[in-house]
Amino acid sequence: MKLPRHRTIARVLESDAQFAEWTQRHRRETALTLALRKHLPRPLAERIRVTEALGSVLEIAAGGGAIAATLRQRVPELRAALARDGWDFTEIRIRVQVAGIGSAGAKSPPRRAWDSADAAPLFDLADRLSDGPLKSALTRWSRRARGR
């Protein structure tokens, strides 16, 4: 029985039409993001990324409202700079995309430290293991944890 040939992920991404389209889109958006960042001050550039570039419309995601407002003021300057770099867009849209904010009630309680009772199964395992590095490491840890 002949086993099927496996393909690397890179080959799948190149050969499948849908994946190839996504990969090409990702590369274009990354190149546009880098081109935009060249024309912006570093604190601003680090907080933006291109999310879509369809036809003559460029969409940029900003990491906050103040960043988006500053970008909106610079749209004519950015459009001209991109045109000089070979990217021709008639419209640049800015949207705010704030990184995930966790809800206040979703915090997990702080983890308590292990005590000897919690570690008892590991101490028992150390007693049953044959001589070796794992047994010696568990034995040393057991002595330190029990204060001996």
Image (cartoon, rainbow, N blue to C red):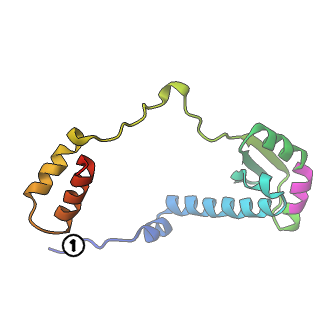
Picture coordinates of residue 85 (x, y %)?
Answer: 84, 68
Picture coordinates of residue 86 (x, y %)?
Answer: 83, 67
Q: Nearer the viewer, residue 58 or 112?
A: 112
Asked if residue 56 shows in the view, the reply is no
Q: Mainly helix, strand or loop, the magenta region?
A: helix
Q: How many numbered circles are shown? A: 1
Q: Secondary structure at mark 1?
A: loop
| For residue 145, side relative to residue 89 (left or right) | left
| For residue 117, side relative to residue 69 (left or right) | left
Is residue 28 a member of the stretch shown in magenta?
A: no
Q: At 53% from the left edge and 64% from the top edge, which residue is drawn?
A: 20
The image quadrant of residue 138 is bottom left
Q: Is 78 above or below relative to 63?
A: below
Give the quarter of the figure containing the N terminus.
Answer: bottom left
Q: At 8% from the left edge and 65% from the top edge, which residue is drawn?
A: 130
Name the kind of residue labelled 1 in the image: Leu
Report the residue marked by disc 1: 3
The image quadrant of residue 38 is bottom right
| For residue 75, side relative to residue 61 (left or right) | right
Q: Nearer the viewer, residue 51 or 63?
A: 63
Q: Is 74 above or below relative to 13?
A: above
Name the residue at the top extreme: 105
Q: Is 29 above or below relative to 64?
A: below
Q: At 87% from the left edge and 56% from the top edge, which residue is drawn?
A: 79
| For residue 100, side relative to residue 121 (left or right) | right
Picture coordinates of residue 34 (x, y %)?
Answer: 73, 63
Name the residue at the front extreme: 148
Asked if residue 16 shows in the view, the reply is yes
Q: Nearer the viewer, residue 120 or 106?
A: 120
Q: Residues within 10 Å of mark 1 (few under 14, many from 20)?
A: few
The magenta stretch is 75-81
